Amino acid sequence: MEPTISDPWGDRFSEAERALLAPFVTDVDAPVFGLRNLPDVVCGALFSRYSRSDKSLRRILLDEFIQAPEADFHAIVALSADAAAHQIVAVHRAEAFYERVLIGYGDDSVAELGGAHVACEGVSNIAAKALEDSRIGISPLEKSTRYVAFNRKVEGRYRYLREAAIMASRHARAYETAMDTLFDTYSALIEPTLAAVRARTPREPGVSERAYASATRARTFDLLRGLLPMATLTNVGLFGNGRAFEYLLTKLYASPLAELQALATALQRALDDQIPSFVKRAKSERGRAYQAYLRETRQEVQTLAAAAAHRLAEVDSASPDVTLVAFDPDADIRVVAAILYPHLDSSLADTRALAEAMTADERMRLIRAYAGRRASRFHRPGRAFEEARYTFDLLADIGAYRDLQRHRMLTQERQRFGVQHGYVVPPEIDEYGLGAPFRAALDQAGEVVSAIAADLPEEAQYAVPFAYRVRWRVTLNLREAYHLCELRSAPQGHPGYRRIAQEMYRQIAAVHPLLAEGMRFVDMNDYALERLDAERRLDEKRRKLSEEQQVNE
Ligand SMILES: Cc1cc2nc3c(=O)[nH]c(=O)nc-3n(C[C@H](O)[C@H](O)[C@H](O)COP(=O)(O)OP(=O)(O)OC[C@H]3O[C@@H](n4cnc5c(N)ncnc54)[C@H](O)[C@@H]3O)c2cc1C
């Protein structure tokens, strides 16, 4: 069966609107399309709107850029429609020439010299995670479950993937019923949750209604996101270079899921209109061999792992959420040697011997000097801190996983989304008296997941709500731990991942107190309204900007 991509947001454009859009997108209709003929800053601004908007990117481009007088769009983008219309044709016509010059050069890294902006609309959260499971070379931006309500219906139907294999199976009805119940419950709980949040944390004097409304809405959506299933459709914008896209395409083509295979084809089409020479290999004979390699090794290892699995005890879901499984016992020697190394002429072996011969006090002084007087979390210690590595086993709700997965510098891999580890209901939901419908919807989905998993284990993942827990492993170095623990414990973060970041910090500090000493910006407090301070700062920025504009006028 030919996999299909669902129609995303039911947006319809008039002929006049299509004509306005055409010069700037590689396709006016396809859910996966590239941006073209736009300055990078406009592409960046457009993608950043994904985070807080329920609209399609083409609608945002029309309403908030092309047709918004204050955007001064036509002054920024001086391009005739005719010239733009010929551009894609020209790219394809010149392809052979560029290929000779570029790929003929024989160096893979040449494909990093061109980049593209691509919008992937109406993709499931399973697909969003696959797109974002990329490291350096791809920069994703995704519609946020914190700022956008996910209960809009298009043509009377909630926006979740009716996954082809599930819909063709005996589970189709139960799947749709459970997904609809999740979205109905999410929808029905928005107003009572918002009212309870507002009652619990009344507006203080000096806080604007705008800041308070934003912070309380964000809190509400944070509390309810556990009801959303992985099938929930979302938007992801990607900026990346050709080489990173080639690998991403290869992985998607090799996926066992039909949605991801279809996404690979759609993504390839959009990239072929922008940087064809750089992504061509993903579908070449060489690319297909690579896909086969990925597919075959996965299948073979899966068979071996399944054969070994019976020697395991029962699934243990009672283990702690954050477990430091491994760390370097000689981390401070390794770090001290790496600190000294660029300042000496000796070999690494001799430098290490010197580090070992130093007194603990001398080593302490050196590590403290290296971490230095950090005035903010943006002051990062250097690469010597990459010598200390930590491996964590994490077990947390999928909502928290979705956020932490975004750290590209980590080595991380998850297990299948499922329901065997139970779910997490935010305590406030019970305190507000809303626990019963919340749990009922999760339980119903849980039963459906188990039933589907017996026949379609990969596809069953679509039915798993974000409140269910998933296990994943993370290996990170100390330098990245500084970044992650400080960023992800910031007051405006979601409580789910703030707690994990705080706990990771605690466990690193327990084994390496001196190395963790410089992590001064980990925030260990709890907050009732995470977004409020950030919204207050936004008010302040807006006020200053409008004052500056008045001065300039
Ligand atoms: C409060 C909060 C709200 C958020 N809201 C949203 C949202 O609404 N939508 C959304 O999509 N995401 C959101 N994010 C996620 C965010 O966009 C990042 O994906 C996430 O913080 C991880 O990326 P990072 O750059 O911080 O760290 P890592 O990916 O771990 O990278 C570590 C560091 O390496 C460097 N680096 C990594 N990759 C590159 C690169 N390609 N080019 C240059 N330097 C690089 C940077 O210095 C980076 O800080 C949010 C994050 C936070 C903390």
Image (spheres, rainbow, N blue to C red):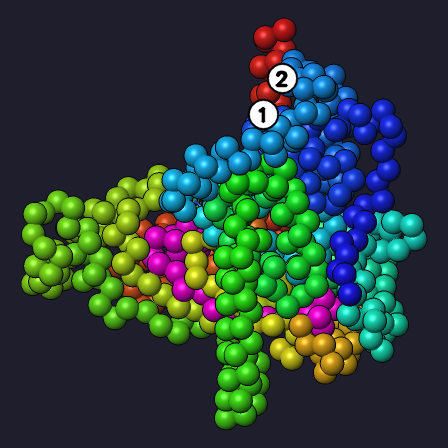
Three-letter residue code for mark 2? Ile
The residue under label 1 is 39
Quadrant including the C terminus: top right
Q: Residue 76 carries which label?
A: 2
Q: Residue at x 32, y 42 (%)?
A: 374
Measuring from the top left, give residue 534's x and y in whole percent. 58, 39
Q: What is the span of residues highlighted in magenta in the rendered image?
A: 459-487
Residue 498 appears anywhere in the view: no
Q: How far apart are labels 1 and 2 at the CA level?
A: 8 Å
Residue at position x 68%, y 25% from top?
86
Give the answer, above or below, for where 69 lies relative to 63: above
- Residue 222, x across and y down, in percent: 68, 54
Which picture quadrant has residue 90? Answer: top right
**Quadrant in which the N terminus is drawn:** bottom right
Magenta stretch containing residue 480, yes or no?
yes
Left/right of residue 475 with respect to residue 456 in the rendered view:
left
- Badge 1 amino acid: Pro
Q: Residues within 10 Å of mark 1 (few under 14, many from 20)?
A: few
Q: Quick check: can you spot residue 383?
A: yes
Please tell me whether mark 1 sits on a helix, a strand or a loop.
loop
Neighbour tally class for label 2: few under 14, some 14-19, many 20 plus, Cα within 10 Å: few
Find residue 456 and report its image quarter.
Answer: bottom right
- Determine the residue positioned at 56% across, 76% down: 299
Determine if the C-beta at disc 2 is less than 8 A from ligand 1: no
Tag shown at residue 420: none
Q: Is residue 114 above or below residue 502?
A: above
| Label 2 residue SS | helix
> Residue at 78% across / 40% down in the picture?
29
Q: Are marks 1 and 2 in contact (CB under 8 Å)?
A: yes
Q: 456 or 470: nearer the eye? A: 456
